[in-house]
Amino acid sequence: MQQESPVPSPLSLSLSLSLVPTFRRVIRNKSTEQFSGLPYIYALLNCLISAWYGSPFMSVDNLLVTTVNSSGAVFQIIYITLFITHAEKPQKVRMFGLLLAVLVIVALIIAGTLQISDFALRHILIGCLSCASLVSMFASPLFVINLVIRTRSVEYMPFYLSLSTFLMSTAFFVYGMLNYDPFVYLPNGIGTILGIVQLALFFYYKNTAGEDAREPLIVSYT
């Protein structure tokens, strides 16, 4: 039987709550400014796929993954709703369309995998999909890392978000190793390395930001 660990759960909560300052700024300014809501769409898709992977239909004794990612999905839906509320009309339409697309894609994934009678096969298939989704989500900060190096400023790389990402990735890396689950420890191992890079850059460039630097948001590259 696989070992369960409660450690990733509060760390996942801290990761979700680390975005609160971002949306305090959005609500205060009543605008999403020039920033993108795509990171929240990607995060929601990842949470839903990972939650499905951890369910009894796909895995054995992996409910912690489902619990953590289900709570994460709730937070992402809240953030997306706030983003849509304060965005300009073109962004509202686009974000709403993307939200519907995510829900349809996840529904198709669930329906499709349930058609596979071989438990081991559907575990591997959804595990690969979950792993790819996690890697793509963890790779998204590479754009911000490039921005930090180019501008020599950490305005667009929130410290608590970077710290929470590092801690959660590390916790799930250990959890995956204890459970001998490569679909958990491989992507989170990558996330741990990227988290270390972000924290190192933060401490290196933290004193170079201007005095009038505002609360950071996730920058848009689309």
Image (cartoon, helix red, strand yellow):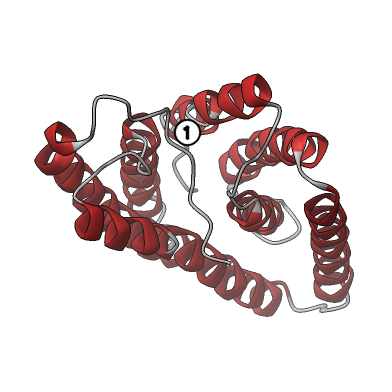
Is disc 1 surrounded by few (<14), some (14 to 19) or many (20+) residues within 10 Å? many
Residue depicted at x 41% and y 52%: 179
Count the numbered circles shown: 1
Q: Nearer the viewer, residue 156 or 89?
A: 89
Quadrant of residue 67 within the rendered picture: top right
Q: Position of residue 92 (x, y in %)?
A: 83, 49
Say if 210 sits above or below 104 in the image: above
Relative side of 108 to 160, left or right? right
Question: Which residue is at 59% across, 21% downward?
Answer: 24
| Above or below, 39 relative to 213 | below
Which residue has dot 1 on it? 15
Q: Position of residue 176 (x, y in %)?
A: 40, 53
Query: Which residue occupies the foreground of this view, 20 or 47?
Result: 20
Whether residue 160 is situated above or below residue 162 in the rendered picture: above
Q: In x, y percent, where is residue 140?
A: 45, 62
Residue occupying image coordinates x 68% and y 40%: 76
101 or 117: nearer the viewer = 101
Q: The C terminus is located in which quarter?
A: bottom right
- The percent position of residue 212, horizontal first and vertical second, equals 32, 26
* Residue at (44, 41) in percent of width and height: 3
User: In the figure, 69 relative to 115: above or below?
Assistant: above
The residue tagged with tag 1: helix, strand or loop? helix
Image quarter of residue 74:
top right
Q: Amino acid at mark 1?
A: Leu
Q: In the figure, is residue 12 to the left or right of 157?
A: right
